[in-house]
Amino acid sequence: MSAIYRDADGDVWMWDAHNEGYYTGDMYTALPIDEVRELYGPLEVREDGSDEYVREPESLEQLLRRIIREELDRRFGKVAR
């Protein structure tokens, strides 16, 4: 089994072995976990056998991207990703 992830919006991302990527509740698209991190910022992870989510540490690049995205959202409003 693979880890289960949760993004900042509360959406849960689960592994889809058929499409070899992670999907959320809509099951529309499976994405590589790195792309999910890039689009939705730092994730929380729940390993198999655990009931709690733990926030993943951010790399410097992820931190800078998140700060820039939050500032742009603040100045110009949220845009569809």
Image (spheres, rainbow, N blue to C red):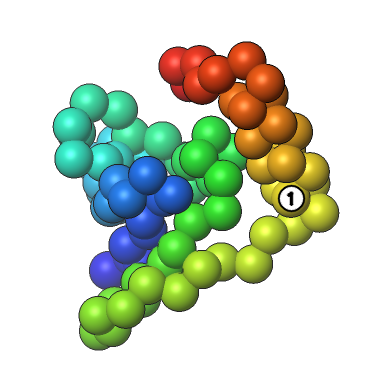
Q: Nearer the viewer, residue 47 or 58?
A: 58
Number of numbered discs visible in the structure rendering = 1
Q: Is residue 14 above or below residue 56?
A: above
Q: Residue at x 64, y 35 (%)?
A: 70
Q: Could you tell whether 64 is left or right of 46 in the image? A: right
Which residue is at the far bottom?
49
Q: Could you tell whether 13 is left or right of 73 in the image? A: left
Q: Nearer the viewer, residue 8 or 33?
A: 8
Where does label 1 land, which residue? 63
* Residue 28, position as x, y percentages in the image: 22, 26
Which corner quadrant of the image does residue 47 belong to?
Answer: bottom left
Is residue 35 visible from the viewing direction of this image? no
Which residue is at the far left?
26
Q: Indicate the quadrant containing the N terminus: top left, top right, bottom left or bottom right.
A: bottom left
* Residue 21, position as x, y percentages in the image: 37, 42
SS at circle 1:
helix
* Residue 78, position as x, y percentages in the image: 51, 21
Q: Could you tell whether 28 is left or right of 60 in the image? A: left
Q: Residue at x 32, y 62 (%)?
A: 4
Q: Residues within 10 Å of mark 1 (few under 14, many from 20)?
A: some
The amino acid beneath tag 1 is Leu
Q: Residue at x 53, y 34 (%)?
A: 39
Which corner quadrant of the image does residue 60 belong to?
Answer: bottom right
Q: Nearer the viewer, residue 22 or 20?
A: 22
